[in-house]
Amino acid sequence: MGVLDSVGTLLAEIANLIADGQRILSLSDKRHWGQDEREQERALDSVLDEARKDFQELGPLVNGRSQYEHDRRHDSMEELRAIRAKFQALTDKLKDWSRSGGPIDPTWVRETYSLKRELHRAQCRAAMRVFTSAREASQRCLGAFIVQRKQRAPTRDAKAGIKPDENTYRRYFADELLACKNVGAFQRFGDQDIAFVCDFCDGHLVWEDIERMPTVRSSTQAVPPGSSDKPVSLLANDSNWQALALSNCGQHQKQIIFAPVAIANHIIPTHGDWEAKLLCPLCEAIGEQPQDEDDDEEPYRPDEEFDDVKSLQEHLEWQHGSSTLPTTTTADNNCCVM
């Protein structure tokens, strides 16, 4: 282990190990290749492509690639060194295979894709640590920041005088959902719940007793895009934080917090915790409003954290009101586990 290791040097060594594996495969006798060998080659190509993409995209999020590349935080170093050792072991196995010949071990493909996932999450967490140290006043996770930035796109376009059409609205909604998928994954949690697991902070957000995760807001269903002269906003307000979901048994419908709204407002779990807490976006919006010059009271500074998705929803319903939105009696076709 080098004392001068950094995120950049370790990622470069990992990339070189992946390239070594690609070189070993490229020099082997392909006349005897089967499906497993071709799949192994594709797996290594996929790992290297995603690692490069992550490196290029994460740097600008933390005030420049140089700060990310030269970071030496202990947790990041330990994670990346462990992954480097795993890629070294995989490369050694490929070298032994190239000398001995015969069919490749098909389990190596699964191992490679597993390492791809580990490397992606390690890069995300390394960037999150840099992001957190640079923004001490904000507890919002970097993954939440990425989703929130996508949600601000309509507001930025409106300020620039851009009037969106139907295709633009659809792009707004699609980009918001894609941002969620890029910062984590949805999965079934137990028998009845669905959880979102953030790649950046490992925090879990849990929606209780739902069959599938809605992909549209209730307000979108109530007022179709383009039917109003008022520009659409993806940021939470009193009328657009909700989505209509089916209970797990499919017997009744219920209003829940639309997944991107919760994901954009989660904070890094405290050490040892697995469930991410959340901030109320409406309270934050109130705190950001200009204060009356004649008001001698201290500016409103919301700092309350909510332990889970359920407690944030209760707060939104009781403190900010719940708009009356039309509901349907049949299953919503715009549902899926994202």
Image (cartoon, helix red, strand yellow):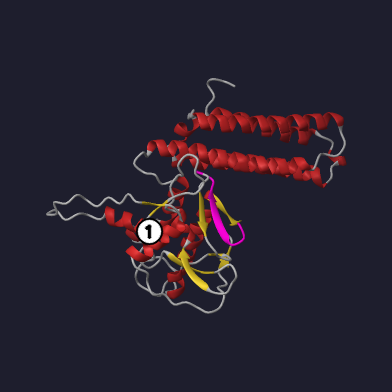
Question: Which is more toward the observer, 153 or 216?
Answer: 216
Q: Which residue is mark 1?
A: 157
**Residue at the left extreme of this rendering:** 294
Region of the chain picked out in magenta, as a range = 190-201
Q: Secondary structure at mark 1?
A: helix
Q: What percent of the width, then of the height, locates residue 250?
A: 59, 72
**Residue at the bottom extreme of this rendering:** 329
- Residue occupying the point 77% across, 31% down: 93
Question: Which is more toward the observer, 316 or 336?
Answer: 316
Q: What percent of the width, then of the height, locates residue 139?
A: 39, 44
Is 115 positioned to the left or the right of 64 in the image?
Answer: right
Label 1 packing within 10 angstroms: few (<14), some (14-19), many (20+): few
Amino acid on which disc 1 is placed: Asp
- Residue occupying the point 32% across, 54% down: 284
- Residue occupying the point 32% across, 63% down: 319
Q: Looking at the image, how many numbered discs can be counted on the residues?
A: 1
Is 234 positioned to the left or the right of 175 in the image?
Answer: left
Question: Which is more toward the observer, 46 or 203?
Answer: 203
Query: In the image, is residue 201 above or below residue 95?
Result: below
Question: Which is more toward the observer, 321 or 240?
Answer: 321
Is 177 positioned to the left or the right of 228 in the image?
Answer: right
Q: What percent of the width, then of the height, locates residue 194?
A: 56, 59
> Is residue 95 at least partly visible in the picture?
yes
Query: In the image, is residue 29 above or below residue 159?
Result: above
Q: Quadrant of the N terminus?
A: top right
> Looking at the rendering, which quadrant does residue 13 occupy?
top right
- Residue occupying the point 47% across, 77% down: 327
Q: What percent of the width, then of the height, locates residue 226?
A: 42, 72
> Is residue 14 at least partly visible in the picture?
no
Based on the picture, tell me whether residue 324 belongs to the magenta stretch.
Answer: no
Q: Quadrant of the C terminus?
A: bottom right
Query: In the image, is residue 280 above or below residue 118?
Result: below
